[in-house]
Image (cartoon, helix red, strand yellow):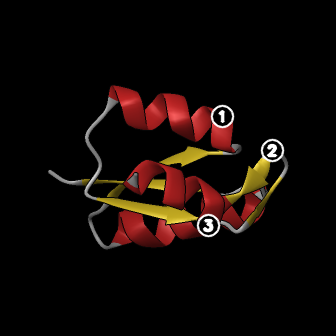
Amino acid sequence: MSRIALVEDHARLAEMIRQALSNAGIETDIFNTLSEARYGISQADYAVLILDRGLPDGDGLAFLRKLRE
């Protein structure tokens, strides 16, 4: 089964998204910071990465650019 990585620092919003995806049969791992996401995506294979732009330790778009390099 495919998994989604969700990078979102707002805990309540992240949980609501996770629950909606779960109801659709999609497993989701939540990361609160880019640092957590960096480690998490190195440990698992994700089909999709959903990124918040404004995180405590950086910008999600800049993080995505680095991942694509």
Look at the numbered disc 1 and give the secondary structure of its residue. helix
Q: Residue furthest right?
A: 56
The residue drawn where x is 47% and y is 73% is 20
Of pointers 2 and 1, the one earlier in the residue sequence: 1
Cα separation between marks 1 and 3: 14 Å
Q: Amino acid at mark 3?
A: Leu
Q: Are marks 2 and 1 in contact (CB under 8 Å)?
A: yes
x, y (%) of residue 24? 31, 73
Residue beneath disc 3: 61
Q: Are marks 2 and 3 in contact (CB under 8 Å)?
A: no
Q: Amino acid at mark 1?
A: Ser
The image quadrant that residue 44 belongs to is: top left
Q: Are marks 1 and 3 in contact (CB under 8 Å)?
A: no
Residue beneath disc 1: 35
For the residue carrying disc 1, how many other residues have a C-alpha within 10 Å: few (<14), some (14-19), or many (20+)?
some
Residue beneath disc 2: 57
x, y (%) of residue 19? 50, 64
The residue drawn where x is 62% and y is 68% is 16
Cα separation between marks 2 and 3: 12 Å
